[in-house]
Amino acid sequence: MSRSRLGARLTPYLLVLPGWLWLVVFFVVPTFVMLSVSTQTGDIVSGFQQTFHWRTYVDGWNQYHTQFIRSIVYGLITTLLCLVIAYPVAYWIAFRGGAHKSSLLFLILLPFFVSFVIRTQSWNFILSDNGMLLSALKNWGLVSQDFHILATAPAVIGGLTYNFLPFMVLPIYVGLERLDPALLEAAADLYGSKTATFRKVVLPLSMPGVFAGVLLTFVPAAADYVNAAILGGARTTMIGNVIQTEYFTNLDYPKASALSFILMAALLLGVFAYARVLGTEDVLDVAAR
Amino acid sequence: MDVVKTPQQAAVTVEPPPGEPVPAIELVKIAKTFSSRRGIVTAVDAIDLVIGEGEFFSLLGPSGCGKTTTLRMIGGFEEPTEGQILLYGDDVVGVPPNHRDVNMVFQSYALFPHMSVFENVAFGLRRKAVSKAETKARVGDMLDLVQLDGKSDRRPRELSGGQQQRVALARALVNRPRALLLDEPLAALDLKLRQAMQLELKRIQREVGITFVFVTHDQNEALTMSDRLVVMNAGRIEQLGSPREVYEHPRTRFVAGFIGTSNLITGRVRAMDGSTALLEAAADECLVVPEAASAGAGVGRDLDVTVRPEKIVISEDRPGSGRCAIRGRVAEVVYLGTSTQYAVATAGGTELSVFVQNASDADDIAGRGADVWLSWRPDHSLALVTTQPAPAESRSDLSGGNQ
Ligand SMILES: Nc1ncnc2c1ncn2[C@@H]1O[C@H](COP(=O)(O)OP(=O)(O)O)[C@@H](O)[C@H]1O
Ligand SMILES: [Mg+2]
């Protein structure tokens, strides 16, 4: 009797156990290992010793703050561009898609069945100085011979925008899709013009989707290194590329770990601030409906 | 009320009878067909309707008969395939909802979840650029009227179903529309609350004096609340009248069946005496149906007759002459508190229901299996028009058109 009662009380915990285990094994443990590594000193040949050398953080920031700031700026611009492109697309599919909604969504996702790196590499082919786009434009004399797109900020930001667009489209679409059509009719019934209906009803009620889309886009975009590596140059290096180089090329594990921590802290702070400013309660209230 | 008409208006306006005001809403042969994958569905089939100013008017009918579609056409959410919709004499077909001077209470209420009660109610006034002070005053008055004062800062989801319903009502009424359209507004409420809201709605309608067009599938609701109502079936109007007329004198078999418990007797007409029909029956039985000629009765033809269960008297002995009387056997007795319901099988093979009030001096009249006489005053025999249209299912499968 009491055994089965105990069992009943334990069941919920047992059910979330795999989730917790996952989190501990793949997030908590690596985080602590990384934290520990970040304060060690030494080198790959003679080995690393724990010396609680926090100075690495200060050095890392001093050395690479340009790349940090650039990553944040690229991430923000990418998020903004994604939002501007994704909202109308999601709106159109949700309200005008009719019976083809699923097919249209599938079309949006279709390029993303190809590997991230291959996809980005093919943009490299298209945009390279002798690639199909620029050579054609140069032949026609539309741009000067030394004009180039690769290795510029627009190329990297363009790549990021392209690659993270679905992360913005999908949550906004979901938000718009489940909007009760009767609300739009009610707004029209109450003398709301199309614009007023959009501003007062559709937009506010789609904010939870926008909120989720911004998070899903900004965080991976700011931390990305593939786009900068393939489409960028020396002056568009992002912090992700720095960490990669420190880790795999310079084998400076402590510095790579410290930089990762700074990035993580910056992103978490940004996300919390964003949530506070946008009045999560309202946003989440509507989302919880 | 004198109405000055421009020639242009006169062109689209059906001339009202002299001396009578222009009706609030007039539907002229409106029809609506939807094309869906299953073919063309005729939701509304050439309806004519005139609704007076200040009337509480109901559209009553079973699910799928076209009530919502009719209402949505008046509101501007659907455009009729054919016909005219006149609002105080103006043809509004093609005018979008935000430019129509009617407001709707949606079945799901459709309250804006991200706005407070106040903001919900103020929505229409803000769109019409009513001043801040006036908006505040009018919303306040309206919330008083629906007894929601003090709740203006709540969000819709913090309110009960009944309160949400009042917000929906206030949100529409605050705009002082020329007509209020209500699509089964009480359907989501439980029985007690629904009955309370029925009275409440009537009170509010009397207070504001606005024309209400009320859609319901619940005949009790329609009978309780309406000044007049139409009974709809398969996109058409079966009968128009006051609740009393429709209940006491159902015109068709469908109406008799839909409103109240109906007893249907079908018999062959043996003779006609003026407009009164005499139905074939056993020698000592008597089935007289007055005013049957207008229902299309003729000698040798079948006639449908209905008698309301509460008009029938059960007795052991044959009642005196001058009453309709038929024999039957009690098949079921159901005690209902204030009354007892008997199901009596007649010799003709039909089963009639009879309600007997449980008065203090009444004994049990008859038990199950007893042979009894059923009798009623001849003027309670109602001849029914046999309607030609087939049921909705078969109609919608046809390739459209009204044949
Ligand atoms: N948008 C639509 N598309 C296709 N058929 C519809 C549409 N709206 C209503 N109908 C059909 O029209 C008929 C009447 O519907 P409706 O007016 O909603 O009936 P009610 O409100 O009386 O239940 C039904 O057969 C319904 O299936
Ligand atoms: Mg309906």
Image (tube, rainbow, N blue to C red):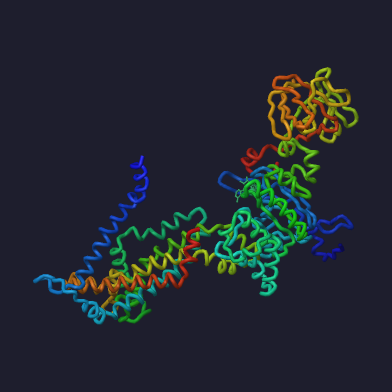
Q: Quadrant of the N terminus of chain B?
A: bottom right
The answer to whether residue B299 shows anywhere in this view is no
Q: Position of residue B233 (x, y in %)?
A: 70, 42
How many labels, in total? 0
Q: Is residue A61 above or below residue A180?
A: below
Give the left or right position of residue A164, taking residue B229 as reference.
Answer: left
Q: Quadrant of residue A132?
A: bottom left
Farthest residue toward the left? Answer: A46
Q: Position of residue A248 (x, y in %)?
A: 18, 69
Q: Quadrant of residue B320?
A: top right
Give the left or right position of residue A150, taking residue B242 as reference.
Answer: left
Q: Quadrant of residue A46?
A: bottom left
Depth check: give the residue in front, A158 or B125.
B125
Q: Is residue B221 above or below residue B308?
A: below
Give the left or right position of residue B333, taking residue A32 as reference.
Answer: right
Q: Position of residue A193 (x, y in %)?
A: 62, 67
The residue under the point 80% across, 64% down is: B8
Q: Quadrant of the C terminus of chain B?
A: top right
Depth check: give the residue in front, B126 or A79.
B126
Q: Position of residue B202 (x, y in %)?
A: 74, 53
